[in-house]
Amino acid sequence: AMDSGTENLDWTAAVLRRLIEFTQDGGVVNIVVNGVNVGAQSYWNAEATMLMHTRGILVMTSDGSMLLTGKRALDYSGAVSAEDNQGIGGYERIMGVNGQAQYWARDVWEACHILLRHYDHTYVAPGERFPRRASTSDPSTRDICAYLHGRGEGYSFERVGDIFSDERNPGRNRPFDIRKVMTAVVDQDATPLERWQDLREGETAVVWDAQLGGYPVALLGIESHPITRLGFVPTDGPDQWSSGTLFPLSSKKIARAINAASDNRPLVVLANLSGFDGSPESMRRLQLEYGAEIGRAVVNFRGPMVFCGICRYHGGAYVVFSRALNEGLEVAALEGSYASVIGGKPAAAVVFASEVDRRTRADNRLQDLEAEIAEADEARRGRLRTRWHEVYESIHSEKLGEVAEQFDTTHSVHRAQRVGSLQHIVEPAGLRPYLIPVSYTHLTLPTIQHWC
C-alpha cells in the first residue's frame, strides 16, 4: 500500500519471532501449501517446519510453490528465474528434492488426508503422554522371518528371515531391502507414512510414521543395498550411495526425524549401519555437522527410544546411538549381528596390515618358494620371483579373510553385551514381540515422571 511500508516488515518480523519462540518451546505448526507463497510467507513456512528443531510437517500440492521473489519480478530485475514459479519453488524440481517439503499431494483434498494421517500418529490428547493406541488385528507375537522379501536391483532373498541366516547370508554382508524388513515388523493393517521420501541424496535413510502393536512410533531404517546416484556425480565422491552408510543429507534426515519424534512418540531404529561416508565430497557437504546433529538429537530426545542392530553397526554409527548419550535409549541387536569400532575387512586391511603380512610371509607355501629361489640359477630366478608375487597376493588375500573373520568373531554382539554396550540380544523371530512392549513399557517410573 502507498500509505504503509516499513511497519509491514516489522509485523512480518513479529510473526517470525512468534514462530521461532513457539516451535522452540515445543509447539507444532503444520502447513499445506496449495498456491504461490512469496517472500515472508515462504520464510514463515521455513521457520515453522524446516529447521532442525521443528516438528511440524509441510505438505505441497501440485499447484503449490514457495518463492522468495516471483518470476515476473526476477525477470524484470535481471535476476535468474525459470520458465514459471513451479520451476523456481515447486515440489518436483526444488522443494521435494531438497527436503524442505516433506510430503506431496495431488490436490488439497489429498493434502488434508495426509495431514489427518499424520495426526493419527502424532496427536496427543490433553493430559495424556503419547498418541493413543489404535486397534490392530496383527498379532504382537508374529514372526517377521516368514515375510516375503523378493528380488531387486543388487539383492535377492526369498524371505526376510534369510537375511539373518548364517547359511544364506554368511557374515551378514549381502545387500537387502530395508523397507521389506520395516514392513515385516510394523502392523500389517496400518499403512506407514513416509516422510522426506523424495529428498535427493538422502535415500539411504528411511523415515516412517508407523504402528507397532497399535502403538504409533517413529521408525527409522538404513537402506542396505547400493543406490544409483541421480544427476552429476563429483569426482571426489562415491559413484553410488553405498549400503548401510549415512551421507550428509541422509544424516540430516535422520537427525530431523529424531527431533520430530522427541517428547511425542517412541523412536525405533532398525540399523544395518557401517558408519558415515568420509569421502571428500561428503566432508565438503557438511558430513561432520549433520552427523553431529544426530548425536545432539539423541542426547536431547525425550521418550522411549530403541536402537536395534539387525546386521552390522560400526564406527561413528556406534557413537551417535550409544547408550552413553541418553539413559532412555535401549540398545539391542539380533543374534548373529556384529558390533565394533570398525568392520572386520577394513580392520584386517588397515589396522592389522602388518599382522596379515606377517602371517602371509610365514606361510609354508611362500617359504618353500623362497628357498627354491635361493637355490635357482639366475635365468630361472626371474621366473620364480614373478611366481612369488603371484603366490604372495593369493596367500595375502587368504590371510586377510582369516584376520577379518577372527576380528568379527571376537567383536560379536555377545562381547558388546558383556561390556555393557547393549542390553539385549534378540532372536530374529522374536523381533516384533520384543519391540512392541519395549517401545512403551521399559521405562522406570522416575524416568517417566522426568519426561512428563
Image (cartoon, rainbow, N blue to C red):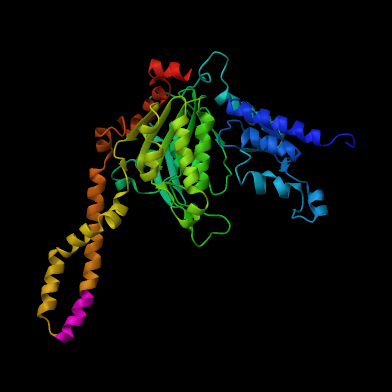
Name the outermost residue toward the bottom.
379
Residue stretch rendered in magenta on the structure: 378-387
Q: Quadrant of residue 364?
A: bottom left
Location of residue 271 by image quarter: top left
State the quadrant of the N terminus: top right
Residue nearest the viewer, comparing 238 with 229: 238
Residue at the image position 79 percent from the left and 56 percent from the top: 78
- Residue located 78% across and 46% down the image: 70
Q: Does residue 340 appear in the picture of this structure?
A: yes
What is the count of numbered marks? 0
Image coords of residue 20 (percent x, y): 63, 31
| Depth check, front residue: 109 or 8 | 8
**Magenta run includes residue 156:** no
The answer to whether residue 201 is left or right of residue 2 is left
In-front residue for pair 393/49: 49
The x, y position of residue 395, in whole percent, is 21, 63
Relative to 119, 286 lies left or right = left
The picture places residue 230, in percent across and down from the top left corner, at 56, 55
Q: Please state if 156 lies on the left or on the right of 344 as rendered.
A: right
Asked if residue 365 is positioned above or below residue 175 in the image, the reply reads below
Q: Which residue is drawn at 44% across and 16% down?
A: 449
Magenta-span inclusion, residue 380: yes
Residue 283 rendering spot, x and y as whole percentages: 48, 52
Q: Main secondary structure of the magenta part?
A: helix
Quick check: can you spot residue 142? Answer: no
Looking at the picture, does residue 75 appear above or below residue 429?
A: below
